[in-house]
Image (cartoon, helix red, strand yellow):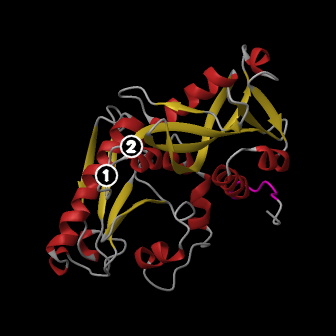
Amino acid sequence: MERLWAPWRLRYVEGEIRHRGCIFCEKPALGDDVGELILLRGRRAYLIMNLFPYNTGHAMAVPFDHVADLAELDPATIAELFELVAWLTTAQRRALRCDGFNIGLNLGAVAGAGISDHVHVHVVPRWQGDANFMPILANTMVIPELIPVTYAKLRAELELSAFGRADDLVVPQAGAVVWLPEERKLAIRRARDGTLVLPKGHIEPGEAAYRAALREVAEEMGLIAELIGWAGALEFEAGGKRRRVVYVLVQAKPGPAFAQHLGRDTVLMDVEEALAALSHEEVRELVATTMRRIGVPVGTSR
């Protein structure tokens, strides 16, 4: 007998998830966008991933206003809500290479709305062949990727978008927090000026941000990296230009070229050692937050 694993659904099956009020009001109020799978916040609406998706990358555009019908929203909110849908589909195409979308609303419980008192727009990526024998014969949709991985892919694209920013003249870059689970160490890059930094670099035209990050880890460190989650985004000035870097969390193992980098431009450090050695405070905070998120102990005195 074959088994399909969808471990995140156990929380639903066992009844762990309980909400006293409206989840679309509760989640943005908690302030933990990564934990609550919020991808992007606008002024009047936000994007959030579906914890129990119909397909990989299933997300929703949701107004902050608690209303049950589109007609109850003011024109500015409706405009932003569907502008977010457009930004989301752009990110999904680049990050997930999907072939199309199902986009829609279920207004009212009779129309199939699971949460009928807070209007929301579903955006479901589709691929050629995803409606195979599994959903047709077994009423089962196969989700081939863990939700934190998909979240990181989409969040990276949306963080680099110009949505909500008056000035979009920033140079986009991608980087990574590189964790070696077997060694229980972080891989840190030694820059040409001697500073210790996270690996990062430019994004090729048409390249997804997360793919750029994986490529930079391979080229700069000789490590084979696998995306496992989101780390954060930072902006800084360099070379007279404003740069925005999205960082993903990867787990890595040595590749064929790793020996050429180790000790020269790549060093392996314990987490606390790395936090003391990294050259920029905002990078240290990003790394500390990321490691705590995956359960790696980080000193609290910092």
Mark 1 — residue?
167
Numbered circle sitting on residue 104: none
Instruction: Say whether residue 200 is left or right of residue 138.
Output: right
In the rendered image, the vertical position of residue 283 relative to residue 252, given as above or below: below
Q: Which mark is residue 170?
A: 2
Residue 132 shows up from this direction = no
- Residue 105 drawn in magenta: no
Residue at image position (44%, 46%) is: 154
Q: Quadrant of the N terminus?
A: top right
Kind of residue sitting beneath label 2: Val
- Along the line of sight, the residue nearer the viewer: 189 or 180: 189
**x, y percent for residue 49:** 44, 57
Question: In this view, which residue lies farthest toward the bottom?
Answer: 20
Mark 2 surroundings: few (<14), some (14-19) or many (≥20) residues within 10 A: some
The foreground one among 80 and 175 is: 175
Displayed quadrant of residue 56: top left
Residue 165 relative to residue 207: left or right: left
Expressed as whole percent of the image width and height from the top left, the position of residue 114 reads 36, 71
* Residue placed most toward the observer, 16 or 221: 221
**Circle 1 SS class:** loop
Q: Is the residue under label 1 in contact with that under label 2 (CB below 8 Å)?
A: yes
Which span is picked out in magenta?
A: 293-298
Q: Which residue is pictured at 53% across the width and 42% down the height? A: 145
C-alpha distance separating marks 2 and 1: 8 Å
